[in-house]
Amino acid sequence: MLMAISRTPYRVSFFGGGTDYPAWFRKHGGAVLSMAINKYCYIGTGFLPPFFGIRHRIIWSHIEPVDAIADIQHPAVRAGLQELGFSDSEGVELFHQGDLPARSGIGSSSAFAVGLINVLTAMRGKQLDAHALAVSAMDLEQNKLKEAVGCQDQIASAYGGLNVVQFRCDGSFEVSPLGLAEEQRADFEKWLMLFYTGSSRLSSDFAKRLISRLDANAPHMKRMHEMVDSGVDLLHAGRLPQFGELLHESWTLKRSLTDGTSTTTIDRIYDDARRAGALGGKLLGAGGTGFMVFIVPPDKQAAVRAALSHLITVPISTDFSGSTIVYRKEELRGLV
C-alpha cells in the first residue's frame, strides 16, 4: 500500500491571459508569460483502514465521511478518483492544505487538479511527467468537470519555473523557460509585490463572460498576445520600469474585456499603489477580487506597503520544482 503527499505551486501570470482559452487559441493561437511561485497546494492520500465505520474520508474546507466515491461532494476529488480507477472496494483518505486561499486568482483550482492527479497516480505506483500532468489536469477541469478554465494554470503548476507558453491552433502547446541569468531573475523578483485583497470568488463565472466576448474583444486579445514577446524582451534587457509600464497597459486592456473584471475597491487599491510608486500591476485570475501583483522599484516598496497597509503582503519567488511528490511510503497491506 502507498501513502503519498504532493506539493504543487500556484502561479502569477503577467501577459497573455485569455489567449490560453481553447475557444481563442484554436482559432488564433495564444501565448502567456507566467511564473510558478514558492507557495503551494498540498494533497495527501492513503488507504483508510476499516476501523472507522466509513469507507472514505475527504478533508478540505469540509470533512466528508462517505461510504461511496459517488457521494463525495468535492467535484474534482470525486471525478479524479473515478477517472484513475479507484473504487469502493478499498477505503481512501485524502486531505488538502494550501499556503494561499482558494478562489483568489493564483490558479488554485488548477494547482489542486494537478496535485490531485499527481498524488493519485503515485498511489498506483506510477509517475507522470510535467506534460502529462498538465494535459490530464486540463482534461479533468475542462472535460470531466465542464469548468470554464484556460490552459495556462495547469502548465505553470505542473512544470514550475518562469516560462513562455505558446498555444497552437491544433491544441498543442510548447513550454519555453525564460532562461534569465540567476542575477537577472533575482532582480526581477525584488521588484514584485503581491497583495491579498481579502476575499474570493468563482473565477469560472467571470471566465464564461470573457469567453462569450472573445470575438468582440479580438483587437484587445491580439494586443495582449503581442505583449508576451515584448515582456520577454524587456526582462532579458533588464528594463524593469518598462516591464511595469507594459503591465499597466495590459491591465488597462484586461479590465475593459468584460464587466466585473475590476471593482471600485480594486480600482482604488490599484490607484493607491500607482500613486505610491508602483509602475504597473494587475488583478490575478479572471477578475473580481483576489490577489494583486505590482511591479515596484525597491526604493518605492515601503511607500506602496504603507499605502496598502490594510492588505496582506505575500513575499514570493520563483518555484522551479513544479508539482512533486514530497512524501511517499510503502506499507504492508493486510487489512481489508
Image (spheres, grey):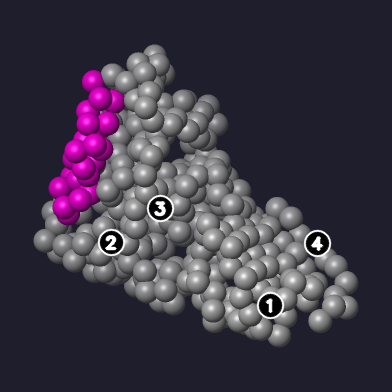
Q: Residue at position x 26%, y 32% from top?
A: 270
- Give the foreground label among 3 and 4: 3
Q: Quadrant of the C terminus?
A: bottom right
Label 1: state its secondary structure. loop
Q: Nearer the viewer, mark 2 or mark 1?
A: 1
Figure quadrant of residue 280: top left
Given residues 179 and 288, the one toward you in this image is: 288
SS type, badge 3: loop
Classify 10 Å Cα crowding around label 4: few (below 14), some (14-19), many (20 and above): few
Q: Is residue 77 left or right of residue 333?
A: left
Amino acid beneath label 1: Arg
Q: Which residue is mark 1?
A: 55
Q: Earlier in the sequence, mark 3 or mark 4?
A: 3
Q: Which residue is mark 3?
A: 103
Q: Which residue is mark 2?
A: 205
Q: Which circle's residue, 3 or 2, is located before the other in the chain?
A: 3
In three-dimensional space, the C-alpha distance between marks 3 and 1, rounded to whole angstroms, equals 29 Å
Q: Is residue 146 above or below residue 266?
A: below
Estimate the x, y position of residue 309 in percent, counting from the top left.
38, 23
* Magenta stretch in the rendered image: 251-275
Mark 4 or 1: in front is 1
Residue 255 within the magenta-colored segment of the rendering: yes
Circles 4 and 2: CB distance less than 8 Å? no
Q: Which amino acid type is marked by label 2?
A: Asp
Q: Circle 4 — which element?
A: strand
- Asked whether disc 3 touches disc 1, contact meaning CB atoms under 8 Å apart, the reply is no
For residue 30, say whether it is visible. no
